[in-house]
Amino acid sequence: MSSIIITINGKDHSLDVDPQMPLLWAIRDVVGLKGTKYGCGVAQCGACTVHLNGEAVRSCVTKVSRAAGQKVVTIEGLSKNNDHPVQRAWQEIDVPQCGYCHSGQIMSAAVLLRDNPNPTDADIDAGMAGNICRCGSYLRVRKAIHLAAGMERKVSSRNE
Amino acid sequence: MNPRSPHTSPRWLNQKTMAMLSVGLFVTTVVTSAFTEERTPTTRPFTLVPATAPVGRDSMASVKAFANVYKVLMSPRCMNCHPAGDIPLQGDDSHRHAMAPRRGIDGKGVYAMKCTNCHQPTNTPGLHTPPGNPDWHLPPATARMVFQGRTPNQLARQLVDPKQNGGKNMAQLLEHAHDGLVVAGWTPGEGRTLPPLSHAEFTKAWTTWIKTGAFAPKP
């Protein structure tokens, strides 16, 4: 079995794994990054969301072979000090209840705000529909995304 | 220097020639209008779709072939990604896709809900897991190519109309039967029925329909 090189959170990892292995397995069990969660295993819940070349893929159904030579970002690599606007907003609003789904929620929200810095409620609902929360934290998720959007707007207006 | 006015007839157009040209033009007009009239009969089992200049026009064979084309295009494997709204359908009962992913401008989804975030280059193993293809997408918002709810007449007309089919000409339409995402309908993954014809049978019906004139069944 030849090794597969994947850049995870800016660091190259050479993985001796089956190319058919789900990326989630490689991230958690081989690389040891446990922030990304296993939820359903069939891309129905969004708990395992990571960024593959900037897109919010479901790592439970993404094979390691798809990520070979590509850039993956997990919740651990979203920011250096847990200070991405989405993470700060999540803390300020105190979004999680049990917290299990929220690494996936945050990774999806980061992509949403990158593509749409000023989302409406409808945009948020459309962009976050693939992330399910059994605790029902949806209203706080929406509120936090609006807050994060405001934080990013403040940063950009300061830089102008 | 020639002093002749530009409004006078050239010398080689004498009166006799002009008269012959006028008669010719009249006859052409009458004949053309007669054929145009014949394009809109009310008793045929089909109607003519926009002129496509195929070879071997045969309205009966064309309409017969389209009946098979229609059966395939309206099967869940084709129609589920050609919905009337902006959310795809799924399953053999063509219910609305769980999570309500949106079409997006390019047909590839929006934000964190892009098609290929879940639909991998190949089918995911297991019952009712996401089917895969490297090019998974819906038709774009600019040419939604709706199949759901279309009658055979409506669908036939739509398929050959470049304004509604993504700008495809007849050669491109013929080729479309071999498009990777179209062919993927015949390897849909566990738990999904196949289209009612094999891909070879579909291709034959599709080709026959187009090459015999792409006639639309009667409304």
Image (cartoon, rainbow, N blue to C red):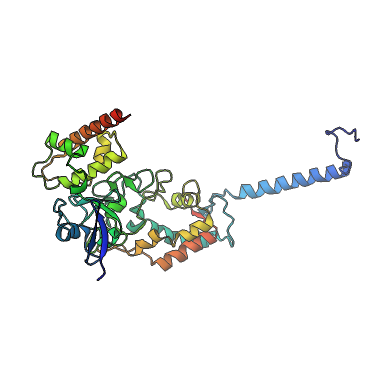
Is residue B195 visible in the rendered image? The answer is no
What x and y, as percent, mark residue A51? 25, 50
Quarter in which the N terminus of chain B is drawn: top right
Residue B121 at x, y percent in the picture: 32, 60
Residue A112 visible:
yes
Image height check: is A45 above or below A154?
below
**Location of residue B15 (image quadrant):** top right
The residue nearer to you, when weighing A11 against B99, is A11
- In the displayed structure image, the side of residue B23 where residue B12 appears, left or right: right
* Residue at the image point whose x is 24% and y is 39% from the top: A125
> Is residue B32 depicted above or below B123 in this figure?
above
Residue at the location (40% across, 66% down)?
B199
> Foreground residue, B12 or B72?
B12
Point out the residue furthest to the left here: A98
Q: Residue at x 24, y 30 (%)?
A: A150
Left or right for A24, reference B89: left
Q: Could you tell me residue B203's position as x and y percent?
A: 45, 64
Observer-nearest residue: A3 or B190? A3
Residue, far bottom: A1
